[in-house]
Amino acid sequence: MIVTVDYGTGNFGSIKNMLRKLGHASVISSETTDIMAATRLILPGIGAFDTGMKQLKATGVIDALNAKVLQEKVPVLGICLGMQLMTCGSAEGQVPGLGWIDATCQRFHFDPNPEKLKVPHMGWNYVYPQRKHFLMQEMHPEPRFYFVHAYHVKCNRKNDILLQTHYGYDFTASFQKENMMGVQFHPEKSHKFGMRLLDNFVKQS
């Protein structure tokens, strides 16, 4: 069962609709029983880091998530804020993250900024794989995804970086460690590229 974790923020409906187009049934839930029955977990999210963590804690599902992700090793995909919540914390706030990935989140800072780049970073950008992984298996040529974010993840372990994107400088667009995957972009808004990535996430055994 594919479970998209509902903690009050995120494009839950868009993710469910894209999965449906791909032929995959899924549920949107914040119930511990559903999470414990999951064979795939998706942790989406938009907005501020501290607000997201507080709302996730309020659902009472963090213990269940830790059990599924850290002990049972069920595949999990964090999307945008969901990816950031998987790290140790963010410069955006003071609340600790889930701590699944040895990483932190920092705000875009361009010094100098000759291109006059705006924050938040918003729009389509190419991604550059740093290693092979099933998420990008049989991906369409020149893969690009839709981003909307002011903060990005900084991995402390280079081997965890899966995809990079350039916006003023190179930053981590996706990470992967064991069963834990995160993407800073929105696959549910990224047309055929996002569909392929989500399909790969679901189908990989």
Image (cartoon, grey):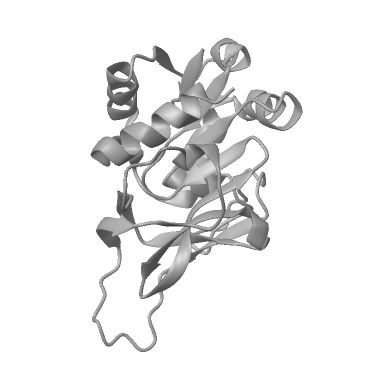
Q: Nearer the viewer, residue 64 or 124?
A: 124
> Would you place residue 123 above or below residue 56 in this image?
below
Query: Does any portion of residue 48 appear in the rendered image?
Result: yes
Q: Can you name the residue that lies furthest to the right here?
A: 71
Q: Position of residue 134 (x, y in %)?
A: 53, 37
Q: Position of residue 64 (x, y in %)?
A: 65, 23
Q: Is residue 170 left or right of residue 36?
A: left
Q: Is residue 133 left or right of residue 24?
A: right
The quadrant of the image that shows the C terminus is top right
Residue 159: percent from left, percent from top: 66, 57
On screen, 8 above or below 96?
Answer: above
Q: Residue at x 32, y 20 (%)?
A: 22
Q: Position of residue 145 (x, y in %)?
A: 31, 49
Question: Which one is nearer the viewer's eye here, 157 or 95?
Answer: 157
**Vertical placement of 150 versus 108: above or below?**
above
Q: How many marks?
A: 0
Which residue is at 38% across, 68% downward? Answer: 166
Quarter of the figure with residue 111? bottom left
Is residue 10 visible to the viewer in this orientation of the structure?
no
Residue 140 location, quadrant: top left
Q: Nearer the viewer, residue 46 or 163?
A: 163
**Residue at position x 58%, y 44% in the image:** 86
